[in-house]
Image (tube, rainbow, N blue to C red):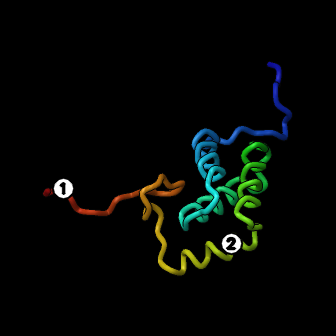
């Protein structure tokens, strides 16, 4: 069995979906609260991960595009959560849960 990747590089099981989310974030020039939360969560997910270098580079490009660094992003995200943000509040796709708790079974 020959190895095509070095032992230090791994493939992340969520790569494909995360690639789509990062591409969406990278195309935004003015992020909303959910975008900020998504980027912070993805940065945490891939922090120290031995692989997915393209995702990590694009996340850093997104930070630069938004005029942020990790500390300022984390500060903004803490404020967003403190104001009562919950995933799925906007109409866009979320990296986290989009669980709908509305009761519309009887309608």
Q: Which label lies toward us, 2 or 1?
A: 2
Residue 48 is marked as: none
Which residue is situated farthest in the top direction here?
A: 1
Which residue occupies 54% across, 75% down? 81
Q: Secondary structure at mark 1?
A: loop
Residue 42, x across and y down, in percent: 65, 56
User: Are discs 2 and 1 less than 8 Å apart at CB?
Assistant: no
* Residue wearing tag 2: 74
The residue carrying pointer 1 sits among few (fewer than 14), some (14 to 19) or many (20 or more) residues within 10 Å by Cα, namely few
- Image quadrant in which the N terminus is located: top right
Mark 2 or mark 1: name the one nearer the start of the chain.
2
Residue 34 point in image, percent of width and height? 53, 63
Q: Is 64 located above or below residue 71 in the figure?
A: above
Question: Is 29 on the left or on the right of 90, as rendered?
Answer: right
* Residue in view at x 63 percent, y 43 percent: 19
- Name which quarter of the figure residue 73 lies in: bottom right
Question: Residue at position x 59%, y 79% from top?
Answer: 79
Label 2: how many Cα within 10 Å (few below 14, some 14–19, many 20+): some
Q: Which of the image's four quarters has the C terminus?
A: bottom left
Task: For mark 2, give the secondary structure.
Answer: helix
Separation (CA) of disc 2 from disc 1: 38 Å
- Residue 105 numbered mark, or none: 1
Residue 49's spot in the image, x, y percent? 76, 50
Q: Residue at x 58, y 61 (%)?
A: 35
| Camera-side residue of 79 and 13 | 79
Q: Residue furthest left?
A: 106
Where in the figure is residue 54, as x and y percent of width and height? 76, 42
């Amino acid at each position: 069995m020959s190895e095509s990747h070095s032992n230090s590089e791994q493939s992340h099981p969520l790569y494909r979906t995360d690639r789509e989310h990062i591409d969406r974030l990278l195309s935004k020039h003015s992020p909303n609260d959910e975008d900020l939360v998504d980027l912070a969560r993805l940065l945490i997910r891939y922090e120290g991960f031995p692989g997915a270098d393209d995702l990590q580079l694009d996340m850093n490009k997104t930070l630069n595009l938004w005029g942020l660094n990790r500390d300022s992003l984390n500060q903004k995200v803490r404020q967003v959560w403190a104001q009562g943000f919950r995933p799925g509040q906007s109409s866009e796709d979320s990296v986290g849960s989009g669980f709908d708790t509305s009761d519309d079974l009887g309608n």
